[in-house]
Amino acid sequence: MAQAPIIIKKKVVHGGHHGGAWKVAYADFVTAMMALFIVLWLLNSSKQIKVAVGGYFKDPTGKSKRVGNGENGSGENFVVNKDNMDKIKDELAAAIHKVDITEKLKDQIEMTITAEGLRIELMETEKGAFFPSGTQEPNGEGKELLTLLAAQLGRLPNKLSIEGHTDAKPFSTTGIYSNWELSADRANSARRIMQQNGLNENQVTQVRGYADQRLRKPQDPENPANRRISVIVHYVERPNIDDDDDKPAPKEGASAKDGAAAKDGAAAKQSPAAAPPEHK
């Protein structure tokens, strides 16, 4: 009887793809490349972006005074101050003129830089460009423009004031509802629409109704251009943090009084004393 063949099985154990060490090296390489691209981007960025990015890493919670808009800490928006007001005005004008309605209303929108800040004026026409005659609520084009302004101004931390103005034509003969009420109600209506479409809850600090007391064209009191809504973007002064660090600290124990006394003593030392009278 033939003997059964003997079969030997060998178990091959593999190294598990080198233990996965290459993944760690690849992750380090990708991280280094990302850091390189961030540095290259920052080198070509504006000073404001550099300050915003640096402020974020110093204070990720967004409470730093030197980052972005001063409130969010995101650095995506900038404060409107006297240094960059012209730039903000140009950017806002470019955003407004992208809307189709501004082609026929471009002469009714005016932005000027004043002592208060950036003043945006929406001036009426005889037919009513933004508010139908005698009404408190804006028309469709007025709402669209106010919504656009709210989306742009809501990105800024600056406080706003909204004013309502009328011409010198009496609103009614009864006197129960006059130009005073109409100007205030229109300003408040503009505030309500803008806060519903982008403005922060506490961004508007004042709603003013001036009636016909601040005419745009005093020589023509009944001109329709005197009827207008004004949105004022107030300045925000940047805190001068670096100046405090550069000031030398006062010497310990010294005071203004001591300095004045030392000055008076030096002056007395320099002036000669009066000679006593001679006795005869």
Image: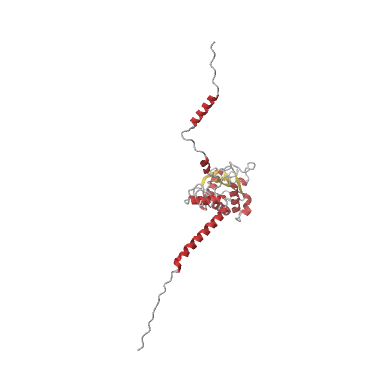
Is residue 165 among the parts visible in the rendering?
no
Give me the residue at 62% from left, 46% from top.
Answer: 225
Pinpoint residue 212: horizontal percent, then vertical percent.
58, 42
Is residue 50 among the parts visible in the rendering?
yes
Q: How is the image coloured?
A: secondary structure
Pinpoint residue 139: horizontal percent, then vertical percent.
57, 53
Q: Nearer the viewer, residue 22 or 68?
A: 22
Q: Residue furthest top?
A: 280
Q: Nearer the viewer, residue 185 or 134?
A: 185
Q: Quadrant of the N terminus?
A: bottom left
Q: Residue furthest right?
A: 219
Give me the residue at 51% from left, 28% from top.
Answer: 262
Q: Residue furthest bottom?
A: 1
Pinpoint residue 2: horizontal percent, then vertical percent.
36, 88
Q: Quadrant of the C terminus?
A: top right
Looking at the image, residue 11 lies above or below residue 150:
below
Q: Nearer the viewer, residue 252 or 94?
A: 252
Query: How many discs appear?
Result: 0
Looking at the image, residue 273 lies above or below residue 235:
above
Pinpoint residue 32: horizontal percent, then vertical percent.
51, 58
